[in-house]
Structures are given as C-alpha cells and as structure tokens.
Image (tube, helix red, strand yellow):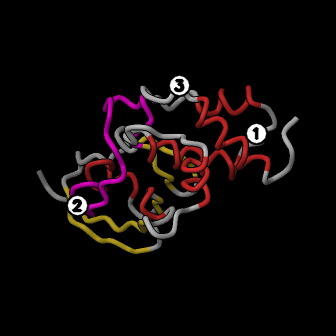
C-alpha cells in the first residue's frame, strides 16, 4: 500500500510522517509519536478512552484515520500538564479523587477540556449528560462530576 505523508501539530509541536493510509489516529499518536497517554479501549468509539482534541473539538482517535488529521492541530493529555506541574483539570481530578485505575482518565481530561471550552455546564444534570460519552468502570462518576462542578464553578456558580 502506498504511504501518504502527513503533517500534524501535536501539543504545539509539528510532526511529519509517512504512514499507511489505514493507520488510525490513536495508533499514530501512540506508536508513531510515542505519546501513550491516549488510551485505546473499545476500538469502536464507545468508551471515550481515546478522546483527543482535533482542531479545537473532541474526537475519538480510534475512529479517525491519521490521514484525516493532515494539517490539523491535535491536543493530547500529554499537553495538559506534567507530573510536576498538573494542568487545572488534572489537579481537580486529584483533589476530588476522580480516578482510580486511571485508564479512562486521559479521555475524560480531554473531553472535559472540550466541554469547558465550548459548552455551558450550569447544572449537575448537564455535567452528567456531557460526560455520558466516556465510560469509567471504577469510580461511579460522582468524584468526576465533583471535579467538573468545581471547574465549571470557576467560570461562575452553578444553578
């Protein structure tokens, strides 16, 4: 199969690679770029573990071909903070114990990044609905909702 050369920005760094056209974006991020924070769970776009920000909007990287991202900017969980300097969403997760095993956490972090940028979250019901596309099998969601509520309150009190 003929390879295609793509160039993408990932967390502010430009990357050019020659890839198979059938390569999934999740595999490109993990295998070609070595950014393993993007997790692959169901490989059907259902669980949300592979969520990244693609040109400013959340996307399931397991459903997106890497060639579709050519010329786009991708944000992954690695761009959100470091072990020594957590990003604001990561800090809220830490404060509210919003993770247990951690497998789903990168997808939640990226989905919440998109939600806080683009959607009003005025009630707990809206938060729960907005997060319904991400699956967590450990926490029961309550602590994740608490973390998002705190972040949403920073923009103004919830109703």
Residue 102, placed above or below residue 2: above
Magenta span: predominant SS is: loop
Q: Position of residue 98 (x, y in %)?
A: 54, 40
Element under disc 2: helix
The one nearer the camera, 16 or 26, is: 26
- Residue occupied by mark 2: 32
Residue 36 is inside the magenta segment:
yes
Q: Residues within 10 Å of mark 3 (few under 14, many from 20)?
A: few
Q: Is residue 150 above or below residue 76?
A: above
How far apart are labels 3 and 1 at the CA level?
20 Å
Q: Which mark is residue 140?
A: 3
**Of discs 2 and 3, which sits in the foreground?**
3
Gap between marks 1 and 2, in whole Å? 36 Å
Task: Choose between 141 and 50: the one closer to the eye.
Answer: 141
Q: Earlier in the sequence, mark 3 or mark 1?
A: 1
Q: Residue 51 lies in what quarter of the image? A: top left
């Amino acid at each position: 199969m003929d390879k295609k050369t793509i160039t993408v920005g990932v967390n502010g760094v430009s990357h050019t690679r020659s890839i198979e056209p059938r390569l999934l974006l999740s595999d490109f991020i993990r295998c070609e770029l070595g950014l393993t924070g993007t997790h692959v769970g169901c490989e059907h776009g259902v669980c949300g573990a592979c969520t990244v920000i693609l040109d400013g909007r959340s996307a399931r990287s397991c459903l997106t071909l890497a060639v579709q991202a050519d010329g786009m900017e991708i944000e992954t969980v690695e761009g959100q903070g470091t072990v020594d300097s957590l990003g604001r969403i990561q800090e809220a997760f830490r404060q509210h114990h919003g993770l247990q095993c951690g497998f789903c956490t990168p997808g939640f972090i990226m989905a919440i990044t998109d939600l806080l940028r683009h959607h009003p979250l005025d009630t707990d019901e809206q938060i729960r609905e907005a997060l319904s596309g991400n699956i967590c099998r450990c926490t029961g969601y309550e602590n994740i909702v608490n973390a998002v509520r705190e972040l949403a309150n920073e923009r103004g009190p919830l109703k």
